[in-house]
Image: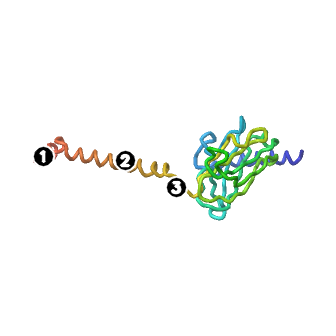
Amino acid sequence: MKTQRTRIAAAGLLLAGVLAHPSMAAAHGTTSGEDDPCLRQVGERVVHFNAYQPQYQLKGQYCTDIPQEGNTFLVVDLVDPALRNEPVGMRVVKGNGSTEAEGEIVADIRPTTHPDGVLRGEARLDEGLYTVTIASEKQNLMRRPQYLLRVHMTDYQKLVRTVAVPLLGVLFAAWLGYKLLRSKWLRNWWAVLRS
């Protein structure tokens, strides 16, 4: 009973610290809880997934795009306190999860209770796509919530968005400038100005 009070007090102090300095808690930029891509729901309950590779970047946290191959620590925060008393497990399968027989199981953490609210695992992830599935013992492990991990892969969709949109803007500005320079209005205005 005393340790539970201590944990509640520690969580309260941590929450007060985060509220006092929100920039310290911005692990995924400035996303709110609903916009955080690392949050998923298990039924009506919420979990938060992170992957760490301290051998490459000590403070780097990832949940969808992992920049390097290698040993990866997988951490699931059981946000809902009710999940801490239920057996919860995690499975990492190589592949995109479209068919169960398609991928090989890379890590399989069997459902157990996690009184501290943290489900931990470690896996060696090579280049490619992986599906991380988190579920309580009451739910099938091959169902939601799932995270699709891209390990050491280029996200071409993100690359196109970051390059194509500014490039289209520059092309549009150049086309507009060309049309303006070729217009009769500008030529007449320039002739009036020179005379």
- Residue situated furthest top in the rendering: 44
3D distance between C-alphas at marks 2 and 3: 22 Å
| Residue underneath mark 1 | 191
- Position in image of residue 37 (x %, y %): 61, 45
Q: Earlier in the sequence, mark 2 or mark 3?
A: 3
- Position in image of residue 38 (x %, y %): 64, 46
- Specify the quadrant of the image occupied by residue 84: top right
| Residue underneath mark 2 | 168
Residue at point 80%, 49% (across, down): 116
Number of other residues with Cα within 10 Å of mark 2, as a class: few under 14, some 14 to 19, many 20 or more: few
Q: Earlier in the sequence, mark 2 or mark 1?
A: 2
- Nearer to us of marks 2 and 1 is 2
Number of other residues with Cα within 10 Å of mark 3, as a class: few under 14, some 14 to 19, many 20 or more: few
Residue at point 74%, 44% (across, down): 78
- Specify the quadrant of the image occupied by residue 67: bottom right
- Nearer to us of marks 1 and 3 is 3
* Amino acid type shown at disc 2: Leu
| Residue underneath mark 3 | 154
* Amino acid type shown at disc 1: Ala
- Position in image of residue 22 (x %, y %): 64, 48
3D distance between C-alphas at marks 1 and 3: 53 Å
Residue 23 in sight here: no
Question: Looking at the image, which is closer to me, 67 or 33?
Answer: 67
- Position in image of residue 62 (x %, y %): 62, 53
Residue at point 45%, 50% (across, down): 160
3D distance between C-alphas at marks 2 and 1: 33 Å
* Amino acid type shown at disc 3: Thr
Determine the secondary structure under disc 3.
loop
Residue at point 28%, 46% (across, down): 175
Q: Earlier in the sequence, mark 1 or mark 3?
A: 3
Mark 2–mark 1 contact, CB under 8 Å? no
How many numbered badges does the structure rendering display? 3
